[in-house]
């Protein structure tokens, strides 16, 4: 059994969270992703962690992920109970409720990082490209639609072109990052003071690798 597979029943403490910098949290998440890809993940005693977390929670980051069931966010970053706040919505978009949740995570609970995680083969992105209409989903997909117009240089511009779909998924993450900064003065101010970072990435469905968005 490797060092990372040692059994742990601990949860993150307030002092440990506060001692972290946003850059350290980013490095920890990507190191966890390396372990996830390699199958070298931490062996956790979940019942013990549940009991240890009863008194409070001090997660190091808030992750906004797509609803997609194939992206187990805590597993992807080799994190356990009490490590992450996770918000999930089709297409990893933001709205007032999610922004408020992120503000709670960072301003009230001390998380050091806002991490927007898109992914390849995203059904919501494909639905937006195809202009799908279905109840309340119609409005959600319209939120993604501007990312389509911002992606140039691809033909055909349809869901059969996987490179185009991937480019739109990446641009959708960038748009979400912009909206977080534009629509949340709380998070924008925390980032400007260096207390948090707001970053994005895309999850590779074939390999499990998380690649930063630039």
Image (cartoon, helix red, strand yellow):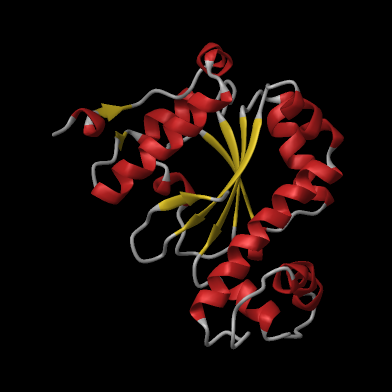
| The N terminus lies in quadrant | top left
Residue 51 in the image: state x and y as whole percent: 46, 27
Residue shown at 24% from the left, 48% from the top: 39
Quarter location, residue 105: top right
On the question of residue 197 being in view, the answer is yes
Q: Is residue 56 left or right of residue 203?
A: right
Q: Is residue 82 toward the left or the right of residue 204 in the image? A: right
Quarter-of-image position of residue 206: bottom left
Q: Is residue 124 above or below residue 174?
A: below
Number of dots carrying numbers: 0
* Residue found farthest to the front: 153
Q: Give me the residue at 32% from left, 47% from top.
A: 36
Residue 89 appears in the picture as rendered:
no
The quadrant where residue 196 appears: top right
Q: Residue at x 61, y 42 (%)?
A: 199
Residue at the outermost left position: 1
The one of 81 and 24 positioned closer to us in this rendering: 24
| 210 versus 185 height, above or below | below
The x, y position of residue 26, in whole percent, is: 50, 33
Residue 194 at what x, y percent from top left? 68, 22
> As displayed, is residue 38 above or below residue 57?
below
Does residue 173 appear left or right of residue 95 in this picture? left
Tell me what residue is drawn at x 41 percent, y 65 percent: 205
Counting from the top left corner in percent of width and height, residue 165 is at 57, 75
């Amino acid at each position: 059994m490797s060092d990372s597979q040692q059994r742990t029943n601990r949860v993150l403490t307030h002092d440990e969270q506060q001692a972290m910098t946003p850059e350290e949290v980013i490095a920890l998440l990507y190191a966890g992703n390396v372990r996830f890809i390699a199958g070298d993940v931490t062996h956790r005693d979940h019942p013990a962690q549940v009991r240890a977390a009863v008194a409070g929670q001090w997660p190091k980051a808030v992750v906004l992920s797509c609803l997609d069931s194939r992206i187990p966010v805590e597993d992807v970053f080799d994190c356990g109970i009490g490590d992450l706040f996770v918000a999930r919505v089709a297409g990893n978009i933001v709205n007032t409720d999610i922004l408020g949740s992120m503000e709670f995570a960072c301003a009230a609970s001390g998380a050091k990082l806002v991490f927007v995680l898109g992914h390849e083969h995203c059904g919501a992105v494909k639905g937006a490209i195809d202009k799908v209409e279905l109840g309340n989903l119609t409005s959600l997909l319209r939120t993604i639609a501007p990312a389509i117009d911002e992606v140039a240089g691809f033909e055909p511009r349809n869901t059969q072109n996987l490179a185009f779909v991937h480019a739109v998924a990446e641009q959708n993450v960038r748009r979400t990052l912009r909206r977080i900064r534009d629509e949340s003065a709380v998070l924008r101010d925390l980032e400007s003071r260096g207390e948090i970072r707001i970053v994005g990435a895309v999850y590779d469905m074939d390999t499990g690798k998380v690649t930063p968005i630039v």
